[in-house]
Image: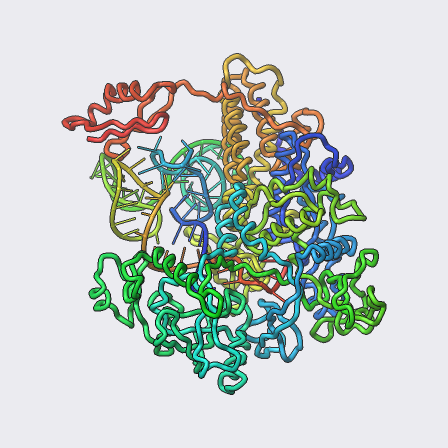
RNA sequence: GCCCCUGUGGCGGAAUUGGUAGACGCGACCGACUCAAAAUCGGUUUCCGCAAGGAGUGCUGGUUCGAUUCCGGCCAGGGGCACCA
């Protein structure tokens, strides 16, 4: 019976804080390590404490929380922890600007963000919280670094960094803008530094082949990682140099190629600016030395190298073609050759490689086609060849290539490999097959303060000496300043001066700190037992809780963070800190939160709160609230401070409540795609909250009791919803879950309206409402607790079991099949659900509508797809 | 530049993975309730067309009885590129 009392409004402000307190005092979400139920570890990528949480966090953590709450309802022991990725550059930048300490800024941000996260009502085990900048955390990281060092997983070698010659500091790639330092504006130079590396490249093959086992990872992430690792099969090939042209001591040049078949098309060779041959030649050629300097002024990022104009310098050195001693090709230094890949030297075949082609055109080098399409003759291919517009030949045969003529590309590669392996030059084969990887070792040294100190001491006599374990942690000094650029650890008056642990003489601490990717490469393992003060991990806890069953985070981490974590887990297993290879069994990458942008008449960005949207004649117009002047509505972009198109989660939770914010973040857009934040969308979510509250209020008045023998439609709808929502939750399709819950709420509304006609439906409706509350409980947990109590259910819904669907209640006696004629829909027909294709065809042929439509046409074929469609071909 | 992804009504999206395109929500419009407004409830809403009907999933070509889904080419937007996290 609908009551006539004034509509009650759900008071989210009061209810949300009340339930959060109930959960907290009851320690409802704290995980007991010895919980006997099957474990489920759900983890969202922990945040960098940048200041305040943003909508991207709300979305990420809402998703993880739904999974955690759903798994608890399904009977799992759930581990759902949270912590802080607290080292990093922004803290140093803030320290520089505010003249404070990075730690002060970081811990203040953590306090703010923790309060914000708590207001979201997330079912997190806060007892396990830690920050990576805490010595209690990085102490263990230093210990593992030393264990890795002992196990041969660490090496020291030189690599290039972006050097700001004015600020005398190393710059991150993002601090290099158009080749200049972001603060000083000085042209950036490349500098070689001796740095620490983790030997991830030793695991290239393993990290690649194990991708196949990650069946619950998105295919695109596995593909990106596979491409990143970049396995290629090729040939190492030694070219003899014309010694008259080469610097002293250089008689040959070894290159790596994946296209030995195109060797007859070679028209130049190119080496990296850091190649020994280039350096030696530069010593005697001032112009070349200047060019090498120019190459070194380029940034170190791959994108910079690839998009820069292809430039080269002819060293005057000539190399002898391995198959034709009379043929010599020039050796260039080129700005697009990387010393890190292969041997830092290539031969160029301009006819069949875009980059080589661009280079050949720029330096007017010969272009000799050596692969032609199969449907052309040699003569035709030569006649058709146009230097200005060379054809791209994907699958062709060799020509202009001596003994290779007529072979396919693959056969020619094989023939070349065989020939060069057999041929020798100075007791070594001229060529050797080589599997090469693009993946480079992981450089972990950073010339910065706010990171985990590398626990090593440099002694003039003993070399690099590990800090003894009893001396760990090596703690960052507090008394540092950021008034000048550069590494405060390096210029600290006392910190780095220590005695050598080995010989006792005066020695120096390593002043480099670790890449923050190291911090995030094992935090998920630490969460399994963060209470262990002695060791980084506890074997029993690792064995019980790892791997992470569901990891959720941004697609921007698809390669580096995830690949490093996969490597780190293997390394930890080698050194006894873990016992598995793959840390993340299931991975989900969620999309960004985006918003419209607004600009005032003067061209300044306006925040959404500074703008009012008027809708007249279906056209949306923005008005700047402060001035009343019209504002321009710009494109929809990722929320960012610079464009001011940010919505503060605090404001949303304050005016609509956490449940509404969570519900909206999960509705509409599929979770892997970007979601557009809109005011209308939040209001819709808010309306649904109030609608649910009204339905529950009405249902609570209804009699509870056994359901009648005739199945009420609302019961059918409830059980369909249980199946659909469960199925979609398993696959993290939250937007579809929400659609199913809307469906159910609509059926419930209609049933309540029909109660006057059929008063016996009371128990069925009440039961369906209870089901609905359980289904949305993972998404709107506060409202669900409130409704649960209102419906007179005992205990917390957070501890309640997931409802079970009865399949018998869902089956229908007959279904409506669409009928197509020649693929176009012409009508429908009702058939019994269990009819077989022949019976369906008979029913269709007998149907009056169908026979009328087929008047005068001959039936060629009838296709019956059971429970789907009938197509008649005429 | 290289690698990867995405593209469906006015808007976010759905489509049982080759089988009724537009579920669900937002917005808009019409109506009920109200002195009035808000809230709420009911209805309409892909486009063209009075209708019958036709067209339609970024563009273009193909495979198929049947294509949003598979294949080729193009266009647009986004993510990553090793020191941002």
| Residue visible at 55% across and 36% down in the picture | A729
Query: B76 above or below A863?
Result: below
**Looking at the image, which is closer to me, A112 or A308?**
A308
Q: Is residue A527 left or right of residue A823?
A: right
Q: Position of residue B59 (x, y in %)?
A: 30, 53
Quadrant in the rendering for residue B70: top left
Q: Quadrant of the N terminus of chain A?
A: top right
Q: Position of residue A796 (x, y in %)?
A: 70, 30
**Looking at the image, which is closer to me, A49 or A461?**
A461
| Residue visible at 58% across and 57% down in the picture | A201
- Considering every residue shown, the one lying at the far top of the view is A709
Query: A738 above or below A795?
Result: below
Query: A704 above or below A175?
Result: above
Q: Is residue A123 visible?
A: no
Q: Is residue A726 left or right of residue A69?
A: left
Q: Is residue B46 left or right of residue B35?
A: left
| Residue visible at 73% across and 74% down in the picture | A483
Quadrant in the rendering for residue A450: bottom right
Q: Position of residue A531 (x, y in %)?
A: 78, 45
- Considering every residue shown, the one lying at the far right of the view is A504
Q: Quadrant of the C terminus of chain A?
A: top left
């Amino acid at each position: 019976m609908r009551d006539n009392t004034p509509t009650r409004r759900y008071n989210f402000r009061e209810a949300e804080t009340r339930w959060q307190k109930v959960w907290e005092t009851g320690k409802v979400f704290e995980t007991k390590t010895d919980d006997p139920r099957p474990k489920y570890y759900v983890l969202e990528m922990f945040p960098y404490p940048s200041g305040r949480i943003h909508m991207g966090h709300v979305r990420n953590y809402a998703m993880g929380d739904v999974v955690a709450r759903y798994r608890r309802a399904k009977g799992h022991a759930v581990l759902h922890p949270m912590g802080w990725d607290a080292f990093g550059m922004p803290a140093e930048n803030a320290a520089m600007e505010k003249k404070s300490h990075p730690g002060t800024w970081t811990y203040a941000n953590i306090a703010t963000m923790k309060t914000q996260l708590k207001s979201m009502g997330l079912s997190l085990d806060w007892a396990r919280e830690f920050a990576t900048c805490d010595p209690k955390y990085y102490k263990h990281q230093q210990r593992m670094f030393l264990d890795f060092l002992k196990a041969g997983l660490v090496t020291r070698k030189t690599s290039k960094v972006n050097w700001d010659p004015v600020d005398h500091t190393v710059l991150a790639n993002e601090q290099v803008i158009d080749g200049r330092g972001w603060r000083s504006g000085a042209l950036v130079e490349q500098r070689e530094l001796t740095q620490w590396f983790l030997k991830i490249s030793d695991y290239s093959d393993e990290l690649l082949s194990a991708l196949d086992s990650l069946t619950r990872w998105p295919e695109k992430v596995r593909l990106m990682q596979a491409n990143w690792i970049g396995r290629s099969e090729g040939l190492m090939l030694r070219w003899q140099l014309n010694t008259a042209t080469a610097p002293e001591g250089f008689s040959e040049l070894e290159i790596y190629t994946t296209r030995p078949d195109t060797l007859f098309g070679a028209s130049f060779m190119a080496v990296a600016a850091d190649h020994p041959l280039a350096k030696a030649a530069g010593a005697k050629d001032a112009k070349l030395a200047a060019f090498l300097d120019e190459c070194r002024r380029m940034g170190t990022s791959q994108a910079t190298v690839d998009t820069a104009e292809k430039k080269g310098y002819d060293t005057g050195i000539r190399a002898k073609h391995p198959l034709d001693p009379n043929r010599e090709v020039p050796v260039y230094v080129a700005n697009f050759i990387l010393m890190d890949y292969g041997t830092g030297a290539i031969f160029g075949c301009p006819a069949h490689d875009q980059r080589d082609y661009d280079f050949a055109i720029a330096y007017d080098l010969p272009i000799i086609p050596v692969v032609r399409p199969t449907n052309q003759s040699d003569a035709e291919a030569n006649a058709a060849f146009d230097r200005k517009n060379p054809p791209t030949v994907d699958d062709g045969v060799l020509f202009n290539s001596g003994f290779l003529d007529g072979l396919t590309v693959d056969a020619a590669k094989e023939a070349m490999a065989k020939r060069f392996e057999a041929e020798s030059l100075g007791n070594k084969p001229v060529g050797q097959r080589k599997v090469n990887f693009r993946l480079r070792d992981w450089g972990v040294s950073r010339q910065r303060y706010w990171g985990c100190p590398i626990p090593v001491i440099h002694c003039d006599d003993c070399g690099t000496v590990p800090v003894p374990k009893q001396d760990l942690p090596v703690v960052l000094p507090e008394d540092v300043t950021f008034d000048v650029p550069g590494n405060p650890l390096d210029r600290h008056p006392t910190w780095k001066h220590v005695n050598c642990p080995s010989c006792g003489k005066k020695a120096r601490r390593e002043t480099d700190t670790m890449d923050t990717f190291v911090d995030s490469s094992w935090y998920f393992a630490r969460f399994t037992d963060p209470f262990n003060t002695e060791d980084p991990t506890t074997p029993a806890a690792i064995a019980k809780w790892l791997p992470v069953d569901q990891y959720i985070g941004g697609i921007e981490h698809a390669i580096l963070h995830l690949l490093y974590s996969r490597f780190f887990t293997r390394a930890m297993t080698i050194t006894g800190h873990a016992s598995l290879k793959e840390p993340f069994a299931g991975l989900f990458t969620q999309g960004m939160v985006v918003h419209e942008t607004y600009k005032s008449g003067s061209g300044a960005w306006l925040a959404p709160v500074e703008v009012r949207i008027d809708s007249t004649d279906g056209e949306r117009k923005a008005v700047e609230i402060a001035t009343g002047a019209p504002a321009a509505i710009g494109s929809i972009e990722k929320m960012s401070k610079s464009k001011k198109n940010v919505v503060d989660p605090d404001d949303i939770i304050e005016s609509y409540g956490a449940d509404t914010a969570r519900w909206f973040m999960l509705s509409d857009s599929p979770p892997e795609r970007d979601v557009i934040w809109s005011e209308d969308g939040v209001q819709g979510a808010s309306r649904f909250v109030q609608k649910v509250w009204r339905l529950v209020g009405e249902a609570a008045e209804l009699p509870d009791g056994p359901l009648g023998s005739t199945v009420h439609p609302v019961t059918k709808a409830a059980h369909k919803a249980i199946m659909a929502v469960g199925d979609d939750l398993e696959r993290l399709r939250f937007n579809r879950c929400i659609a199913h819950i809307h469906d159910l709420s609509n059926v419930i509304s209609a049933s309540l309206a029909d109660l006057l006609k059929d008063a016996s439906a009371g128990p069925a409706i009440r039961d369906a409402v209870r089901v609905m509350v359980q289904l949305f409980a993972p998404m709107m947990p506060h409202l669900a607790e409130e409704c649960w109590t209102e419906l007179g259910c005992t205990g917390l819904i957070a501890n309640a079991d997931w409802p079970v669907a009865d399949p018998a209640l869902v089956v229908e006696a007959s279904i409506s099949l669409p009928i197509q004629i020649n693929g176009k829909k012409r009508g429908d027909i009702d058939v019994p659900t269990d009819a077989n294709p022949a019976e369906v065809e008979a029913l269709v042929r007998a149907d009056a509508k169908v026979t009328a439509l087929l008047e005068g046409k001959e039936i060629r074929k009838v296709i019956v797809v059971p429970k789907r469609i009938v197509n008649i071909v005429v």
